[in-house]
Image: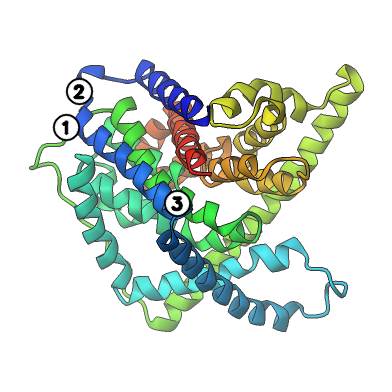
Amino acid sequence: MKYLIAMLGILVVFGLTYIASSDRQKIRYRPLVTMVILQFILAFVLLNTVVGTFLIKGFSNVFAKLLAYAGEGVNFVFGGIANEGQGPFFLNVLLPIVFISVLIGILQYTKILPLVMKYIGLVLSKVNGMGKLESYNALASAILGQSEVFISVKKQIGLLPKNRLYTLCASAMSTVSMSIVGAYMQMIDPKYVVTALVLNLFGGFIIVSILNPYVVDKEEDILTVQESEKQSFFEMLGEYIMDGFKVAIIVAAMLIGFVALIAFINGIFDGIFGISFQQLLGYVFAPIAVIMGVPWKESVDAGSIMAIKMVSNEFVAMLELGKQTAMSSRTIGIVSVFLVSFANFSSIGIIAGAVKGLNEKQGNVVARFGLRLLYGATMVSVLSAIVAGIFM
């Protein structure tokens, strides 16, 4: 039964994406079929094989060690501030982002990361049938982050037509940055984080190829990665330390605001209508949860968490998921995969602002197709959750 529901879900996602396509005549089906098959293979390997278990365990162990090292720095500054046996969310989950950011900075400074991203991007372009720039950007978004990635291609931002700019922005919203992966792994099962990272990369290519199809001429397909300004090693360290700290503070501020706002709105709805705002959103999103493979009896609760992710962010939704005690492990897995992306309303402003900082005209273009951007990124999350659910 779950296979029939999964097939129905995939058809619904493709149908909804096809309806909203900007140019159906330009859709190329061969790369699509290849990437869908790749998604199935990768999901199977990661979730149902010894090799996948080994890879995920290795990946999560690396982050566990990195978080332990980060904890040394956090404890040195904040040791004793928490009650014994308790770990504040900000200290244990968000502040380690600073250390992960530093490691990314070192890999950038030593030219290791740009080289890896550039050549893996070239290989991906052969699979997805898209431009080298689009392929590089999708991979870079998953490592650098949804705003920082545009700096690496800022020379080309002002030269891009609307359709190519949309693809770059959709990739940034469909993935998550490596600097906060460790934080996710402390909130949900690492295997779902790793699975979502891989599936979203190809899912982004699949959805954009239907929603926003185009062909890039070889003359236009030039990949020029922006070199960072020459800095000393310690200048770079200071910059990435502060960047990581800013991310932690911003996420903390958004959590305070969104969690409080949702509680406030829940109180109003409960007092007037006898049903919380979260429950209401749950009923709206329940059909989407069902086509993702969630049983109907759990669909309202799952839909509520999915909706919270869209209207606030994935951190708030992951906190809500952690409170669920009655959900089956399969439902938790499916919803977890859905949550691992930046597909929410606040990301529209973040991405538009990042592009506008580099090119004001193009930033205004991004702001105009913001809702379409969220639509595409949400389809990517739904597709990844469906494919992962087949192997749970």
Question: N-terminal of the two: label 2 or label 1?
Answer: 2
Q: Which of the numbered marks, if any, corresponds to residue 215? A: 1
Residue 298 picture location, percent across and down: 70, 31
Image quarter of residue 362: top left
- The residue at the point 24 percent across, 50 percent down is 124
Q: Which of the numbered marks, if any, corresponds to residue 296? A: none
Q: Relative to 289, is 358 on the left or the right?
A: left
Towards the viewer: 11 or 66? 11
Q: Relative to 78, is 247 on the left or the right?
A: left
Q: Which callout, 2 or 3, points to the residue nearer the camera?
A: 3
Towards the viewer: 112 or 46? 46
The residue pinned by badge 3 equals 197
- The residue at the point 72 percent across, 32 percent down is 301
Mark pair 2, 1: CA separation: 8 Å
> What is the three-letter code of the residue carrying label 1?
Val
- 224 in relation to 166, above or below: below
The residue pinned by badge 2 equals 26
Q: Relative to 348, is 266 on the left or the right?
A: right
> What is the three-letter code of the residue carrying label 2?
Lys
Helix, strand or loop for disc 1: loop
- CB-based contact (under 8 Å), mark 2 and mark 1: yes
Q: Is residue 282 visible in the rendered structure shown here?
A: yes
Q: Relative to 36, is 302 on the left or the right?
A: right
Residue 35 picture location, percent across and down: 29, 40
